[in-house]
Image (cartoon, grey):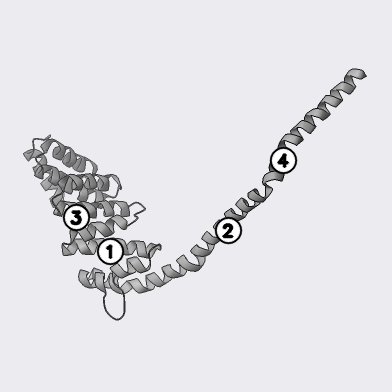
Amino acid sequence: MAKRKVAQNTDTIEVQEVQTVSAPFWEKYQKQLLYALGAVVVLIAGWWLYKTLIVAPKQQEAVASMWQAQNMFERDSFRLALDGPGGGFDGFVALADKYSGTPAGNLANYYAGVSYLHLGEFDNAIQYLEKYDAEGELLPAMKYGALGDAYSEKKDFSKALDLYKKATDATDNELLSSVYLKRLGLLYQHEGNKEEAVKVFERLRRDYPNQQSQDWREIEKYIYRDGGAK
């Protein structure tokens, strides 16, 4: 009986010791913990309100404001698309700034970059294209490809090669991949790197075969000329 009593007392002492170790932490810091929890709740609620009450309405407004600039872009009126199509509508430069943080504002960066590219203003094109946050299967390749074009026009061929590689690796879309593979191969040719040019052209011939196209016949010619497999 005495042994059992000692065991019970030991258990009681251990429980009391645990309580004396754990209890003071909450008692001492409960205000700080509650403040921290409250701050997290406020941040979450604030973000939700921002997305719901600010971003969503701005996105709707941006889409409604953008169609005239897109119309000018489709007509190849790139200066009007950039600076303002008239009728009180903003161009892509103003739209990108005014609706920054919305999907439409983000897309305006891409339109602005491509418009500047067409106008030969390559530094401006790079500035806006780099701001563009591209997602999905096609858009990253289109961004990298356009940047590659801009750097190629600036004679920064090393940078252009890197971007064309990224464009070809960013998508499995036949049209985009074949376009940028061809540009990559031609740029390797221009730089005198026949070995890499042949690799690219053979990849293009292997992965995207289309013997009826003019491109296919040109690729065959390039491979033969640079000493690739016949």
Q: Quadrant of the C terminus?
A: top left
Q: Is residue 211 visible?
A: no
* The one of 87 and 19 positioned closer to us in this rendering: 19
Q: Is residue 198 visible?
A: yes
Residue holding disc 1: 111
Residue holding disc 2: 42
Element under disc 1: helix
- Please, what is the three-letter code of the amino acid marked with disc 1? Tyr
Q: Is residue 16 above or below residue 61?
A: above
Lower sequence index among marks 4 and 1: 4
Which residue appears at 21% of the width and 70% of the height?
Answer: 79
Which residue appears at 20% of the width and 46% of the height?
Answer: 159
Which residue appears at 64% of the width and 48% of the height?
Answer: 33
Q: CA distance from mark 1 to mark 2?
A: 37 Å
Q: CA distance from mark 1 to mark 3?
A: 14 Å
Residue holding disc 4: 24
- Please, what is the three-letter code of the amino acid marked with disc 3? Ala
Lower sequence index among marks 3 and 2: 2
